[in-house]
Image (cartoon, rainbow, N blue to C red):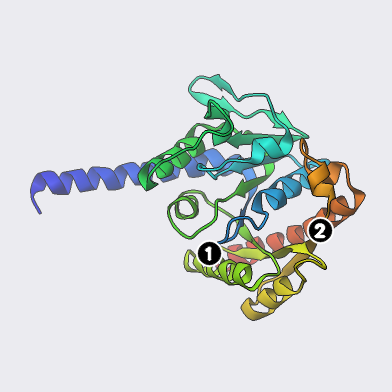
Amino acid sequence: MSNPQQQARLESVKKQFQQKRDITDRFSTIKNKIAVYSGKGGVGKTTIATGLASVLAANGFKVGIFDADIDCPNVTQAFGLVDLPVSRDGKFFPPVAHGVKIMSMAFFQERPDEAIIWRGPMVHNAINQFLQITEWGELDYLIVDLPPGTSDAPLTIMQTLPLDGFIIVTTPQPLARLDATRSLNMVRKMNIPIIGVVENFSGQVFGFGAGEELSQETGVAFLGRFELRSDYQASSDAPALFNSPAVRKEFEAVMLRAIPTLDALKTSNESTG
């Protein structure tokens, strides 16, 4: 390898190291950073992420949510949010809806139905830019709504953002459970703690039990299930828990299991670190 090539590679490594350190410093004011994830699309990751953020905020915590799905961002629609981030001194200050600070690629689309057709490096750069320029302030919890799959976008988040734990989403169908297992194994390969598994769309239509089975097979906590309800369809401009006591009860149950589990994982990591 020639000297110019060596120098270019060294500069690239230095830049990546500095970038990661800057992001770590920026997120030091956030106590807990939780990613909601599954290998399969359409299992309700955004529903779980927005519901969890909302129920945490409703219980008095300072909460933010980062929509890391660059291709198909949906968090702003789930909250019925129309306000835009405020830009000041090269930073973006997220708008707030239902007590939750929100940052999403959707803010930068001209139309909500616009297709974002980007290759991996562009997605990677967009995520890193969001991580570097968003001013979250002090938060108790940041919820990261990840896109599906086990490639560029989830990998960028796992390698760049100092996450405290993952919540894995599955549905009762065997294929969804398989993809949830794949995503769980990816998280483990990245040496990031897994808070637990939730099962979505449970009930008479699709059945139930995949969440508990996945929990038992992998040795992670089962945090709870969310039934398939028409309440979600009726709530188009806000997370369903604000209009449905049954949905809110399910999210509060998951929250009450997830918080102590995360605390225990962090304590264990600190004692062995």
Packing grade of label 2 (10 A; few <14, some 14-19, many >=20) is few
Query: Which residue ends up furthest to the top in the rendered image?
Result: 88
In the rendered view, tell whether residue 4 sits above or below residue 41. above
**Residue 218 locus on image (x, y percent):** 62, 77
Image quadrant assignment for residue 265: bottom right
Task: State which mark lies toward you, 2 or 1.
Answer: 1
In the displayed structure image, the side of residue 23 where residue 194 appears, left or right: right
Residue 66, image x, y percentages = 60, 41
Q: Nearer the viewer, residue 26 or 160?
A: 160
| Tag 2 secondary structure | helix
Q: Which mark is residue 187?
A: 1
Left or right: 11 in relation to 16: left
Amino acid type at circle 2 is Leu
Which amino acid, by three-letter code, is at mark 1?
Val
Mark 2 lies on residue: 256
Kindly identify which numbered label has been placed on residue 17: none
Residue drawn where x is 75% and y is 74% of the image: 209
* Rendered location of residue 199, percent (x, y): 73, 65
Q: Position of residue 1 (x, y in %)?
A: 10, 54
Q: Residue furthest left?
A: 2
- The foreground one among 117 and 39 is 117
Depth check, front residue: 209 or 229: 229
Q: Does the image show residue 244?
A: yes
Q: Residue at x 48, y 60 (%)?
A: 150
